[in-house]
Image (cartoon, rainbow, N blue to C red):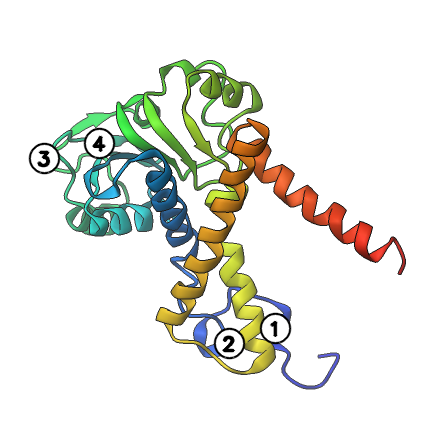
Amino acid sequence: MTTRHATPAVVTGKPTVLGGSLGGFEASARGCLFVLREAGNVTGLDLKTATVAIQGFGSVGSVMARLLWEEGARVIAVSDSKGGVLNKEGIDIPALLRFKAATGSVEAFPGCSPIPSDEVLKVQCDILILAALENQITIENAGYVRAKIVAEAANGPTTPEADLMLGRKEVMVLPDILANAGGVTVSYFEWLQDLQQLFWDEAEVNRRLEQVMVKAFHEVHDTTKKYGCDYRAAAYIVAIGRVAQAVIERGIWP
């Protein structure tokens, strides 16, 4: 309205017909998958043989379930706001996605045992993905977490006190500002594409996303080794270090 011509780059998350980016819907989950793959590489955990529990089965959790299932991982528990299901032999994720679309919930999915929504946090597994709400793992339930890796695909799902407890249990926590950065990264890609009026195919979006996420993981991982800290502290060290270096190089003006 101000410039009297289309400026689609000023807002992201648009439909592709209006200048949105391909791959945007899956970006948060796919970025988390790339981080998990790298975490598996440094810990010796192969996603193809990993067991996974997922809290939250919305736009991120359901896509994570599908992507991990395609990787060969065994998703053994999922939950949404109405309930959860457990099958230690592995859940048929394509069938579960159809069931959720038809019924509105994963609750009562055939071939699984029903569990309360919060019980998914306590399932023994290799990877626990938090894709629901904030403050889900607290000081009260952190002691029950039996996963080797916790990936924060939601914003702020672990309280600071719980984070410390998980660290004492030697649980690798992949913090939200790293694990779910795929969405904002592809949002940035959308901005770039709109500015250039040159749009990438989905394979190119995913290739560039993988490049960014893998680089980010290893910067954080290397920082954990350098300072002997956890991944959350390392992620902040990397981020704040970039800002500090920019101030040093540029000065505070302009």
Res 145 label: none
* Residue at x-position 42% and y-position 16%: 169
- Secondary structure of the residue carrying numbered label 1: helix
* Mark 1 residue crowding within 10 angstroms, few (<14) / some (14–19) / many (20+): some
Q: Mark yes or no: residue 218 visible.
A: yes
The residue lying furthest to the front in this view is 226
Query: Tag 2 or tag 3, which sits nearer the N-term?
Result: 2
Query: Tag 1 or tag 3, which sits nearer the N-term?
Result: 1
Real-space CA distance between mark 1 and mark 4, rounded to the nearest whole angstrom: 41 Å
Q: The residue under label 2 is which amino acid type?
A: Gly
- Secondary structure of the residue carrying numbered label 2: loop
- Secondary structure of the residue carrying numbered label 3: loop
Real-space CA distance between mark 2 and mark 4, rounded to the nearest whole angstrom: 39 Å
Q: Residue 24 at x, y = what percent?
A: 43, 63
Task: Name the residue beneath numbered marker 1.
Answer: 9
Query: Tag 4 or tag 2, which sits nearer the N-term?
Result: 2
Task: Name the residue beneath numbered marker 4.
Answer: 85
Res 111 label: 3
* Mark 3 residue crowding within 10 angstroms, few (<14) / some (14–19) / many (20+): few
